[in-house]
Image (spheres, rainbow, N blue to C red):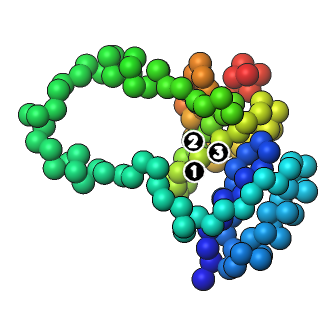
């Protein structure tokens, strides 16, 4: 049975699957060497607690009459366009596989690594890409429009 591990590198965090701690450490070291980044830590994911537990059942149980109605433009102004990334994060990408619908997220601490990832992913054309920076939340669908990477950064 495989376990999930979070590999913390200098410029990014990667989730891996390995059968045991020793193989996870070896794979983390290989990744570190391949990506030419310092290896900071390898953390077993099954022992981590969620910082923000998902409480959707509690929210769904609240009658709609008890919730304040908010116009869409106000919601976007205060909740979507007022996001703040921490100081260590340069940007994050949310990807949706156009074939399977599965979603994943990548976080980058440096512009160079984010740009490299974006170039490779945009050229594949398999993902809808949502890019979040301090100034921007944009979604790009490669089936609908070409992504001009130079304009993004």
Mark 3 burial class by Cα count in 10 Å: few <14, some 14-19, many 20+:
some
Image position of 114 (left or right of 92):
right
- Residue in view at x 60 percent, y 31 percent: 86
Residue wearing tag 1? 104
Left or right: 68 in relation to 101: left
Foreground residue among 61 and 88? 88
Q: Quadrant of residue 117?
A: top right
Contact flag, marks 1 and 2 (Cβ < 8 Å): yes
State the mark number for residue 106: 3
Residue at 58% x, 64% y is: 45
- 10 sits to left or right of 79: right
From the top left corner, tell me how far across and down residue 111 is, in percent: 77, 30
- Name the residue that disc number 2 marks: 94
Distance from disc 1 to disc 2, alpha carbons, whole Å, reads 6 Å
Check the picture and name the quadrant holding the C terminus: top right
Q: Earlier in the sequence, mark 3 or mark 2?
A: 2
Q: Where is residue 119 in the image (x, y as percent from the top left)?
A: 77, 37
The residue located at (59%, 46%) in the rendering is 105
Marks 3 and 1: CB-CB under 8 Å? Answer: yes
Q: Is residue 142 visible?
A: no
Marks 3 and 2, how far apart at CA: 7 Å
């Amino acid at each position: 049975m495989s376990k999930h591990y979070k590999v913390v590198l200098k410029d990014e965090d990667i989730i891996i699957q390995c059968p045991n701690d020793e193989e996870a450490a070896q794979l983390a070291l290989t990744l570190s060497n391949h990506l030419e980044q310092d290896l900071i830590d390898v953390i077993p994911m099954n022992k981590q607690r969620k910082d923000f537990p998902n409480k959707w059942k509690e929210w769904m149980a609240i009658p709609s009459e008890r919730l304040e109605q908010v116009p869409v433009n106000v919601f976007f102004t205060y909740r979507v366009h007022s996001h703040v990334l921490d100081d260590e994060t340069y940007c994050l990408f949310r990807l949706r596989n156009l074939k399977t619908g599965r979603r994943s997220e990548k976080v980058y601490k440096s512009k160079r690594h984010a740009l490299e990832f974006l170039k490779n992913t945009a050229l594949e054309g398999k993902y809808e890409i949502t890019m979040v920076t301090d100034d921007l939340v944009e979604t790009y669908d490669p089936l609908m429009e070409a992504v001009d990477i130079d304009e993004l950064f």
